[in-house]
Image (cartoon, helix red, strand yellow):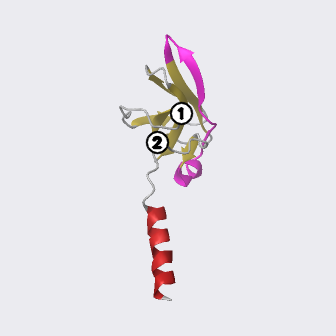
Amino acid sequence: MRIIVLGAMLALLSGCTSDRTTIDTSQSLVMESSVLSAGILTGEPAISEHEGQQRGSSQLYNQQEKPVTLYYRFYWYDDKGLEILPFEAPRKITVAPHSSVEISSQTGNLTANKVRLYLYL
């Protein structure tokens, strides 16, 4: 009986030590619930080429009567799901009442083909 239990524990531990080097990039927009509660609407970021660089962009819309200040960060990934360095610093933006603004990020890394946008207050 002890051998079976020990074998099961070793199998669980070996599963915990798997070395994952890729990130699931299927979710291209991560928005904390507080951002939605503050009245900010947006869609998934679009990728385009601009002056030989990859450009990720998204429109933010404030549906409230007051300005909303939020933070955002774009994360870039290659076709294997590996995050591209260097990391971009978080940015801050204020969206005026009942208006929209475009936020964007550019990378000179030509292997970048996926982007994730993270929004938070």
Q: Which residue is mark 1?
A: 115
Residue 63 visible at all: yes
Mark 2–mark 1 distance (CA, rounded to whole Å): 19 Å
Residue 67 visible at all: no
Give the crowd class for mark 2: few <14, some 14-19, many >=20 residues within 10 Å: some
Q: In percent of the image, x 48 and y 20: which residue is there?
A: 110
Q: Which mark is residue 70?
A: 2
| Vertical comparison of 28 with 103: above or below | below
Secondary structure of residue under mark 2: strand
Mark toward the viewer: 2 or 1: 1
Give the crowd class for mark 1: few <14, some 14-19, many >=20 residues within 10 Å: many
| Vertical comparison of 9 with 82: above or below | below
Q: Which residues are magenta?
A: 32-53
Q: Nearer the viewer, residue 4 or 114?
A: 4
Residue 24, horizontal then vertical, whole percent: 55, 45
Q: In percent of the image, x 46 and y 87: which residue is there?
A: 2
| Vertical comparison of 58 with 40: above or below | above
Look at label 2 and name its amino acid: Leu
Q: Quadrant of residue 27?
A: top right
Q: Which mark is residue 25?
A: none
Residue 91, horizontal then vertical, whole percent: 40, 35
Whether 68 is among the magenta residues is no
Q: Quadrant of residue 71?
A: top left
Q: Nearer the viewer, residue 33 or 61?
A: 33
Whether 42 is among the magenta residues is yes
Secondary structure of residue under mark 1: strand
Q: How many marks?
A: 2
Horizontal side of residue 117 vs 43, given as left or right:
left
